């Protein structure tokens, strides 16, 4: 704790950080946490500390962490992303600045920040409001939500390195990384390999992390045993008239044309089995979206809905299923 600097007076955040350190020092082999809830109800799980340590050390080796480098925690210490950042900093004897999770994660910069983890929304806000602050950042790790095409284009012009992470609570944070300035593929961290099943769902093999054959809900294009291109989630796939449609592919194509948050989801249809819906956050407004020029006839949304606010998970992701239920409830009012 002597290397932790609190740049927030939020007692809840401060206590969560202290709680992590206390729990880590306890004799128990396990640490308790919960899944993000992005694809269903959050569930409590326990992670073996030895595997968490192995993950943090592998991540540190990838990013070449050094003693006394400055790391900033701008995520909730309650999430696995926040816990693992604290653990990386502790194991590599780095200095950790703790700020309140917000859309202004780079306020109060005291010196060059060597490493920070953000969600895409936070980076978007920094670019829009205080882009010069990014000149004081060396490496940004993005996770927690898909990265839009428009944000990706902005990232390529930033003065700092920006990586996308691939992982989940069950893998103790990321097990693959993608340099968003140079790469189109995710590359495994040390000791991790991949395979796929007949549905092209990613399977993770990581003995050092206690993972033997973890089947994920992610559909990928496997390039090598240690690299893949992410295509979307199998549990979000829309089957319309026998055609499998990945919402994430449509979202990537639409992102340059819609300024508000939005997502694609399917709903039952008597004729086609399922149909494609576009749900946009905010008030209804006229938007010139060239659907027929950027999407196939199967991908074009059959209906567009607007909701004032989206429901989020505890880690800040859009909770698609709960938001869809909210929409359904509003239509029945």
Image (tube, rainbow, N blue to C red):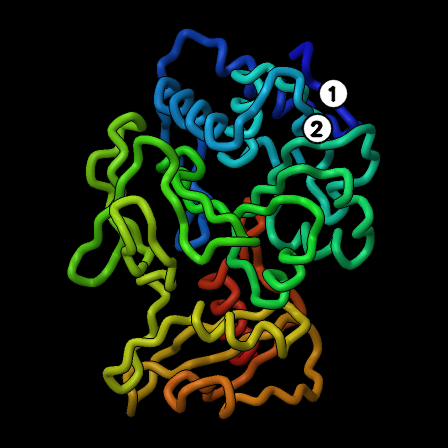
Q: Quadrant of the C terminus?
A: bottom right
Q: Position of 229 compared to 82: left or right?
A: left
Secondary structure at numbered mark 1: strand
Q: x and y percent of residue 263 in the render?
A: 52, 70
Q: x and y percent of residue 271 in the render?
A: 29, 92
User: What residue is pinned by disc 2?
Assistant: 98
Residue 139 numbered tag: none
Task: Work out whether 268 lies above or below 113.
Answer: below
Task: Work out whether 150 lies above or below 267.
Answer: above
State which quadrant residue 10 falls in: top right
Q: Position of 67 compared to 186: left or right?
A: right
* Residue at 57% over, 80% down: 305
Find the residue positioned furthest to the front.
182
Residue 5 numbered tag: 1
Precedes in sequence: disc 2 or disc 1:
1
Secondary structure at numbered mark 2: strand
How many neighbours does mark 1 have within 10 angstroms: few (below 14), some (14-19), or many (20 or more)? few
Q: Quadrant of the N terminus?
A: top right
Q: Could you tell me if the residues under marks 2 and 1 are in contact, i.e. CB atoms within 8 Å?
A: yes
How many neighbours does mark 2 have within 10 angstroms: few (below 14), some (14-19), or many (20 or more)? many
Q: Position of 210 compared to 64: left or right?
A: left
* Residue at 62% over, 74% down: 256
State which quadrant residue 15 falls in: top right
* Residue at 49% over, 15% down: 24
Number of numbered markers: 2
Find the residue positioned furthest to the left.
198
Foreground of the two, 322 or 229: 229
Foreground of the two, 76 or 256: 256
Q: x and y percent of residue 6 in the render?
A: 75, 23
Find the residue positioned furthest to the top.
27
Alpha-carbon span between mark 2 and mark 1 = 6 Å
State which quadrant residue 300 falls in: bottom left
């Amino acid at each position: 704790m002597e290397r932790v600097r609190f740049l927030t007076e939020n007692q809840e955040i401060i206590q969560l950080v202290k709680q992590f350190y206390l729990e880590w020092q306890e004799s128990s082999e396990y640490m308790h946490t919960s899944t993000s809830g992005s694809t269903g109800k959050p569930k409590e799980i326990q992670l073996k500390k030895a595997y968490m340590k192995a993950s943090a050390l592998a991540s540190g080796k990838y990013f070449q962490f050094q003693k006394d480098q400055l790391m900033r925690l701008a995520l909730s210490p309650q999430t696995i992303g926040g816990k693992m950042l604290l653990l990386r900093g502790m194991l590599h004897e780095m200095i950790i600045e703790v700020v309140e999770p917000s859309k202004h994660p780079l306020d109060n910069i005291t010196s060059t920040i060597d490493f920070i983890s953000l969600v895409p929304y936070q980076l978007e806000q920094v670019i829009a409001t205080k882009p010069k602050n990014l000149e004081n950042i060396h490496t940004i790790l993005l996770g927690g939500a898909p990265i839009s095409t428009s944000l990706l284009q902005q990232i390529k012009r930033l003065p700092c390195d920006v990586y996308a992470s691939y992982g989940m609570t069950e893998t103790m944070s990321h097990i693959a990384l993608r340099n968003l300035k140079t790469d189109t593929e995710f590359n495994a961290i040390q000791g991790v390999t991949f395979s796929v099943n007949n549905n092209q769902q990613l399977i993770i093999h990581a003995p050092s992390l206690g993972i033997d054959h973890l089947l994920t809900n992610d559909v990928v294009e496997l390039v090598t045993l240690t690299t893949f291109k992410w295509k979307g989630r199998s549990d979000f796939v829309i089957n319309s008239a026998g055609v499998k449609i990945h919402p994430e592919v449509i979202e990537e194509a639409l992102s340059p044309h819609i300024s508000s948050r939005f997502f694609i989801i399917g709903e039952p249809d008597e004729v086609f089995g399922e149909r494609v819906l576009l749900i946009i956050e905010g008030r209804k407004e006229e938007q010139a979206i060239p659907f027929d020029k950027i999407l196939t006839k199967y991908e074009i949304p059959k209906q567009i809905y607007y909701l004032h606010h989206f429901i989020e998970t505890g880690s800040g992701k859009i909770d698609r299923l709960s938001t869809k239920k909210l929409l359904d409830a509003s239509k029945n009012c």
